[in-house]
Image (spheres, helix red, strand yellow):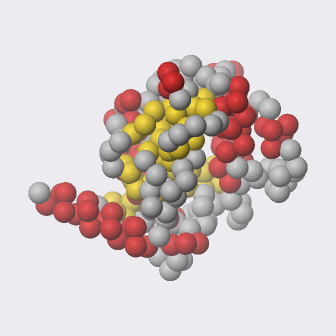
Amino acid sequence: MKALVLAAGLGERMRPLTEHTPKPLLAAGGKPLVEWHLEKLAAIGVREVVLNISWLAGRFPEVLGDGERWGLRLHHAYEGPTPLETGGGMLRALPLLAGPDGSDEPFIAVNGDIWTDYDFSRLPRQPAGTAHLVLVDNPAQHPGGDFVLGAEGRLVENGAPRLTFAGIGVYRPSLFERWREVVGDAEGAHDDPPRFKLAPLLREGILRGTVGGEHHRGQWTDVGTPQRLAELDARLGRAAGE
């Protein structure tokens, strides 16, 4: 199974920390945020990881090398100076993630700017539909949540409680089969390469009943501000000293 780490963001809310360092390479608990993911992915048997990169792209190979230290092979999918958003970035990386002969083999995708104690071994190797999302309780900065987890682990459009997408999921390339129709004339959709968000594709999949999920009740942090990064670093430091 292959994996994608979404690492192309500009990190504007993290300035000045991201003026010389991409957000996924900022350190928490003594190592870059992305390294926590690479360790988890290697531990469950993933051997090939794609990083989609844009801002300060050259820093990734400088810091991470070729992945050999984790038993991984790293591929870098450069998106140009303007990130392609989650959907566009994933679409561009599909040739590096698809199975043999373009088969619909699932892959893991993780946001590079989160930290969690979620056990990646819980992710399904063969999701029943086109995607399987990990959801968490709504953080203070996102009280409205994103999705509703319905019966039998299926995401549904309406209901309560709403939960927040953790930025961890398993996807099949077939999720993108109708992306042009679903995304329509959204800003950036007609660019070359196209730039669009993943959320419309997920919501369309939810309406068709092809998106599943689970609720992670453990630790999770969206490292979106310098304050949250400092709080995470302090917490991990205390845990290491116990």
Viewer-nearest residue: 136 or 122: 136
Can residue 101 be seen? Answer: yes
* Residue reaching furthest to the bottom: 16
Image coords of residue 138 (percent x, y)? 46, 52
Q: Quadrant of the C terminus?
A: bottom left
Viewer-nearest residue: 79 or 226: 226
Image coords of residue 185 (percent x, y)? 88, 49
- Position of 7 with respect to 43 (left or right) is right
Q: Is residue 145 above or below residue 24?
A: above
Image coords of residue 229 (percent x, y)? 39, 67
Instruction: Classify residue 131 by image quadrant.
Output: top right
Q: Is residue 149 above or below residue 23?
A: above
* Residue reaching furthest to the front: 159
Can residue 172 be seen? Answer: no
Instruction: Classify residue 114 by image quadrant.
Output: bottom left
Instruction: Classify residue 199 by image quadrant.
Output: top right
Image coords of residue 135 (percent x, y)? 47, 41
Which residue is at a point 43% across and 73% down the rendered structure image? 226
- Position of 143 with respect to 70 (left or right) is right
- Position of 225 with respect to 57 (left or right) is left
Which residue is at a point 33% across and 49% down the rendered structure image? 219
- Position of 92 with respect to 122 (left or right) is right
Viewer-nearest residue: 171 or 73: 171
Which residue is at a point 50% across and 21% down the rendered structure image? 152
Q: How many marks?
A: 0
Q: Is residue 34 above or below residue 94?
A: below
Which residue is at a point 70% across and 65% down the rendered structure image? 81
